[in-house]
Amino acid sequence: MNKKSLILGIETSCDDTSMAIIEKAATGSCLPPKILAHHSFNQEKLLKRWGGVVPEIAARNHMEMITPIFTQVLASANLKIEDVVKEISLIGVTALPGLLGPLLTGINLAKTLSLLLKLPIVPVNHLYAHLEAIWLTEDAYKRNLSYPYLGLLVSGGHSIYFLVQGRNCFELLGQTIDDAAGEAFDKGGRLLGLPYPAGKIIDDLSRRGDPTRFAFPIGLQAEKSCNLSYSGLKTSLKTFLVQHPQIIDLENPSQELCDLCASYQMAIIRALLLKMDYALAKAGAGALPIVVGGGVAANRTLREEVIKKYALKGRHQVFVVPFEYCTDNGAMIANYAGLHEDEALAYPQSLMIDAKARLQ
């Protein structure tokens, strides 16, 4: 293996402790990088009792898991700790945005390796990495995805439209002014009495439901902008449940409950699609390719609706990040670092990297 081609990616921005080692494809090969190892520990079961992410608890769990995950990813890549300096040439680590405690856990591991082994580090904005994870797929190369593209990032904490004009040019077109789409799923799930995280459960129940049965509002519907709002949708669901408390029976889900989940989910998705139209118009670049990434991009109905509206009608090429790279993961961080290798901070400048909680 060529030392110049192996990259370690470290992701600890929220509740996933994830690392990957990838091998970059040869320059000009039009192939995605090869995933040599990819392991994650998700805290969902641990955090379920609190109904969501508790920053201090998440940070402590990262500290417990980061060494075992690092050991595991080295073993899967057939590397020993003494091989790291000989085989790995670059480290990518999430530096922003996220919870400061968890972020610092990953950054401190990256700095330790940089200090001991003199390896350069690329500090990664993991929101950008979510969209650029599309370059981990053969599909992006086979169908000749190119810049610029319109990126829809949908996750637990962010819902943002980007005009991605190049690997170093992400122009923010619009975003949520209150809750993100993922928060709308989880908070709606809490109202329904569903365990955390509720997004997948709502998606599963929705597959058996009628999304047209109940009407829910779309925030900022009359505003011709790319901004989103989900606070009114949650209030509408709460009001509905006060009026129809008999619907909630999780042990024996009724058709009415499935219809309710489907209708609520479709309201979240309709808002994303409506504002996508405004984002495309604001970008003003014709038939832009569309890339959808982030944790909520794993929602099956969202994936289907985006493809149906934009791809099947021949209006745009649509690329959706594969399920395994939707949630926070080390592979997308390693991939982003590989795409930005020329921006790496060499030792000792690498030791100055710090965490930032918010998108700059």
Image (cartoon, rainbow, N blue to C red):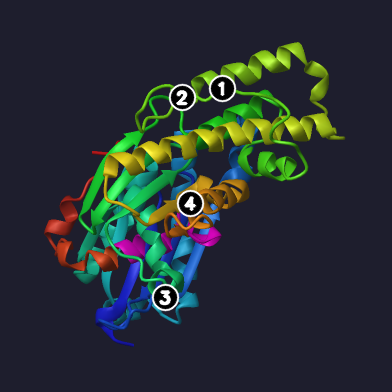
In three-dimensional space, the C-alpha distance between marks 1 and 3, rounded to whole angstroms, equals: 39 Å
Helix, strand or loop under label 2 = loop
Quarter occupied by residue 339: bottom left
Q: Quadrant of the N terminus?
A: bottom left
Give the x, y percent position of residue 219. 48, 23
Asked whether 78 falls inside the magenta stretch, the response is no
Residue 142 numbered tag? 3
- Give the residue furthest to the right: 252
Q: Give yes or no for contact between labels 3 and 4 (Cβ–Cβ under 8 Å).
A: no
Residue pointed to by mark 2: 221
Label 2: few (<14), some or many (≥20) within 10 Å? some
Give the amino acid type for the residue marked by disc 4 in the picture: Tyr
Give the amino acid type for the residue marked by disc 1 in the picture: Pro
Counting residues from the start of the chain, the first of labels 3 and 4 encountered is 3
Label 4: few (<14), some or many (≥20) within 10 Å? some
* Residue drawn where x is 72% and y is 17% of the image: 241
Residue 217 numbered tag? 1
State whether residue 356 appears in this view: no
- Magenta-colored span: 321-336
Give the x, y percent position of residue 73. 46, 70
Q: Give yes or no for contact between labels 1 and 2 (Cβ–Cβ under 8 Å).
A: yes
Main SS of the magenta part reads: helix
Residue pointed to by mark 4: 310
